[in-house]
Image (spheres, helix red, strand yellow):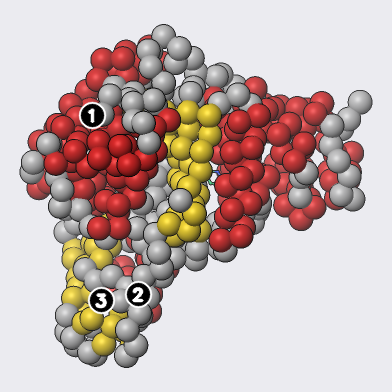
Amino acid sequence: MSSFLSLIENKREGRKHSPEELRFLVEGFATGSLPDYQGAAWLMAAYLRGLDPDETLWLTEAMVRSGRVVDLSPISGVKVDKHSTGGVADTTTLAVGPMVAACGVPVAKMSGRGLGHTGGTLDKLESIPGFSVDMSPERFERQVAEIGLAIVAQSDDVAPADRAMYALRDVTGTVPSMPLIVGSVVSKKIAGGADAILLDVKCGAGAFMRTAEESAVLADELVRVGTALGRRFEAVITDMNVPLGSAIGNALEVREAVEVLAGKGGARLTELAVDLCARMLVLGGVADGLDAGRRMARASIDDGSALAKMAEWVAAQGGDPTITDDPGVLPLAKVRAVLAADRDGFVSSVAADAVGRVAVALGAGRARKGDPVDASAGVLLMARMGDPVRRGDPLAEVHGSDPRAVEEAVRALSAAMPVGYDAVTEPPLFVRG
Ligand code: URA
Ligand code: CA
């Protein structure tokens, strides 16, 4: 008979857990029978000692079984989902969902809220007036069947162990652990019910994995474990040294997603949206290959069908669909200030993690679980890494509600996007395509 204490001691000594032991532990997290101090001790032991490939698989399987597994089989077609391991100015989900649905592949997605310096899809969606992310499983299923797209809050009974573990990891310095990330991501995606899952593993200063090597190991582990548990998983690795798009903040990112679908989005964000859409169309069985998928994705932007799908989807979830032709409907910050270049030169870098933290400090994200977010707060980048600028040119616009916080944000941002004399270029978007 295992006890929580003996499991902590075993992992502290680097010994291997059995499937039964991991199930016992995961149940403890899910039901609350495992006290936080013992849960935290085990997480740190697992962080430091690691879990081997068997343990990672057993942990993930136990996390799936800790709650309900959504059954999407009544909806016809291959249901696809996408997941990003967490980025800055990463509003791709809001653009890709309507694109994929417009191309005929049903998207049934459960999402989370932002934590740390990365944004959460639910917080972004809730900045749309009237939009609701809560719905019954029956309505979720019906909406996907009817319009091919629903994005909702993950309900409490889906992967409850992850919820408990993530909250503790977040406050104990144990988030950037490969096996723990694999358990967290894969268990949620499998419990969400999709047949095929595309993972966008972020790499760089603004991501949990800083190097291409670490990211590759994580991507391969995610695919290995997901596949072993019976779903189709595929992973790409993309850069998160620089922000993906130009908007960081909830309403600002909705506005940017609309721009992408209207064909007016930034090149980097649009390129990723098209690529991820193409891969989901291949996974969904409607495109013969990536090139065909990319053509379909681009066509959904060019012919207006993706933007029309967004309006239909927003309306279906109670939101104001006029955001797709009048972004003025979205909340706009009362206090705005511009960061200007203090000399002629080139933008040397735009530090994704620092920019993300500035946006959180302005109220766009939460410092603690349950904190409210300010829908209109954030940062709008007006220059990208490598851009030539003249003294006085605007580099970014800061949006907030408190003049002092906005002033502070402008200062912090000037350190995050320095202007230098050397011409530089942004790192390539795809670390591994
Ligand atoms: N995203 C998740 O959902 N879980 C993790 O552990 C890390 C990133
Ligand atoms: Ca995420």
Quadrant hosting residue 414: bottom left
Q: How crowded is mark 3: few (under 14 residues within 10 Å), some or many (20 or more)?
A: some
Residue picked out by circle 1: 102
Against 299, is 173 above or below? below
| Mark 3–mark 1 CB contact (< 8 Å) | no
Residue picked out by circle 2: 425
Q: In this view, does 301 lie to the left or right of 203?
A: left
Disc 2 to disc 1, how far (Cα)?
34 Å
Against 26, is 91 above or below? below
Disc 3 to disc 2, how far (Cα)?
8 Å
Quarter of the picture containing the N terminus is top right
Label 1 sits on a secondary structure element that is helix
Amino acid type at image mark 1: Ala
* Ligand 2 within 8 Å of the CB at mark 1: no
Against 418, is 218 above or below? above
Q: Please tell me the numbered disc located at residue 387.
A: 3
Q: Which residue is drawn at 24% across and 62% down?
A: 380
